[in-house]
Image (cartoon, rainbow, N blue to C red):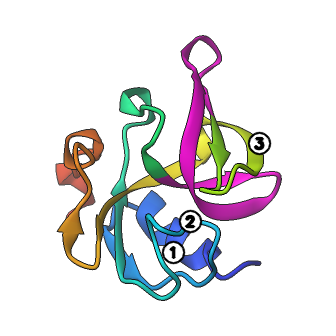
Amino acid sequence: MGALDAVAARVAGGATVEFRPSGSSMVPLIRSRQLVAVAPVDPSKLEPGDIVLARAAGTVYLRLVSSLDQARQRVQISNNRGRINGWTNHARVFGICVAVDGTPRPGAAAKARAADPDDRP
């Protein structure tokens, strides 16, 4: 189980989660240990360039959407240095990065999934 699995579970459950990912693969969009906010996403609204929390090849990543295949309901994710992590289906795209260090990501909020009123405590 990787460090982002617990975050993915919370986001999949409907929570918007703030955390500080480490690593340099998303620089300059996200630098190591910057505070990011990830909200549940409607995968059908994604576009290349969006940053998502998704599982590909058994690992949860915070990555760029690099390509879409709407007919097969899947997205390709990549880091910001050109490495492709692979394709994953919409069910494995848990959330979208809506802010980095408090700065909203353009257009991301409109792609977040609305909270289900039945999910309230």
User: Depth-wise, is mark 2 or mark 1 nearer the camera?
Assistant: 2
Residue 26: x and y in percent read 56, 65
Identify which residue is drawn at 51% across, 74% down. Answer: 7
Helix, strand or loop at label 1? It is helix
Residue carrying label 3: 86
User: Depth-wise, is mark 2 or mark 3 nearer the camera?
Assistant: 2
Residue 110: x and y in percent read 20, 40
Task: Check the picture and name the quadrant holding the N terminus.
Answer: bottom right
Residue 86: x and y in percent read 77, 42
Identify which residue is drawn at 76% across, 63% down. Answer: 59
Q: Specify the quadrant of the image occupied by residue 49.
A: top left
Taking depth in this image into account, of 102 and 41 the one nearest to the observer is 102
| Part of the protein shown in magenta | 52-75
Residue sitting farthest toward the right: 57
Q: What's the CA distance linking mark 2 and mark 3?
A: 16 Å
- Residue 72 versus residue 36 in the image, above or below: above
Q: Label 3: how many residues lie within 10 Å, few (<14), some (14-19) or many (20+)? A: some
- Residue 102 versus residue 8 in the image, above or below: below
Task: Name the amino acid type tagged 2.
Answer: Met
Give the side of residue 121 with respect to residue 2, left or right: left
Question: Reading the chain from its start, which is encountered first: label 2 or label 3?
Answer: 2
Q: Specify the quadrant of the image occupied by residue 58.
A: bottom right
Residue carrying label 1: 7
Residue carrying label 2: 26
Question: Reading the chain from its start, which is encountered first: label 3 or label 1?
Answer: 1
Residue sitting farthest toward the top: 71
80 is within the stretch colored magenta: no
Residue 90 seen = no
Taking depth in this image into account, of 95 and 31 the one nearest to the observer is 31
Task: Name the amino acid type tagged 1.
Answer: Val
Task: Name the amino acid type tagged 3.
Answer: Gly
